[in-house]
Image (cartoon, rainbow, N blue to C red):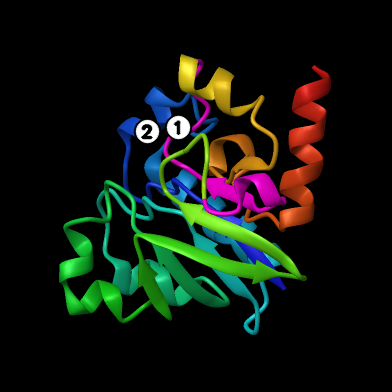
Amino acid sequence: MIYYTADLHIGHANIIKYCNRPFETVEEMDQTIIDNWNSVVREDDDVYIVGDVFFKGNPNIFMPKMKGRKHLIVGNHDANLVSTASYCKHFETIKKYLCIEDKGRHVVLFHYPILEWSGYYHGTYHVYGHIHNNDNETNHIMTKVPNAFNAGVDVNDFTPQTLDQLIARHKLDLQN
């Protein structure tokens, strides 16, 4: 199975306030993210993290607790960490932009939301992060873009999602 997630911000206490996350402490947030991850991901699953895994915290403590083969699409908060071997060793692949196939469907992965991508006019999907649950112009625009899906934990119950789940949530958002 393939899962997608973004913007975990493990160790980032202020993200609780910035994104109105329902946690009292950073420890509670981090543990919930790990527990939710492990409730759906198996060891032989692939998880594409579309940026911003950590803000603070020790990858050597957290990453081994999270099941699956992890693939990182570099986000703005990962940029400095990907230069360290102790961080990189936790990922099967590390890319800034990646095209994959998921059950015969082409998917473009990039941390930042983009309005057009490779294969846009041919049914290719775009999975992104970065904008969290912000009530801003970018979020309003992206919710209307066909085949573009926010994989951020703030809009996905702090749980990795399949492409089918992202598609279903997007359809609901369009109806509201």
Q: Choose between 118 and 48: the one closer to the eye.
A: 118
Q: Secondary structure at mark 1?
A: loop
**Crowding near the residue tagged with mark 1, few <14, some 14–19, many ≥20 C-alpha atoms within 10 Å:** many
Mark positioned earlier in the residue sequence (1 or 2): 2
Q: Choose between 157 and 129: the one closer to the eye.
A: 129
Could you say which disc has been placed on residue 131 in the image?
Answer: 1
Q: Quadrant of residue 46?
A: bottom right
Give the amino acid at mark 2.
Answer: Ile
The residue at the point 39 percent across, 67 percent down is 62
Q: Secondary structure at mark 2?
A: helix
Note whether residue 136 is visible.
Answer: no
| Main SS of residues in magenta | loop
Q: Quadrant of the N terminus?
A: bottom right
The residue at the point 61 percent across, 59 percent down is 107
Compared across the picture, whether 161 is left or right of 167 comes to: left
Q: Nearer the viewer, mark 1 or mark 2?
A: 1
Compared across the picture, whether 152 is left or right of 168 comes to: left
Position of residue 68 measured from the top left corner of the image (x, y, whole percent): 57, 77
Q: Which residues are magenta?
A: 118-135
The residue at the point 49 percent across, 73 percent down is 70
Give the amino acid at mark 1.
Answer: Ile
Q: Choose between 105 and 73: the one closer to the eye.
A: 105
Q: Quadrant of residue 19?
A: top left
Magenta run includes residue 101: no
Q: Choose between 84 and 150: the one closer to the eye.
A: 150
**Crowding near the residue tagged with mark 2, few <14, some 14–19, many ≥20 C-alpha atoms within 10 Å:** some
Residue where numbered disc 2 is placed: 15
| Measured Cα–Cα span from mark 1 to mark 2 | 12 Å
Q: Quadrant of the C terminus?
A: top right
Q: Is residue 24 above or below residue 176?
A: below
Q: Quadrant of residue 171?
A: top right
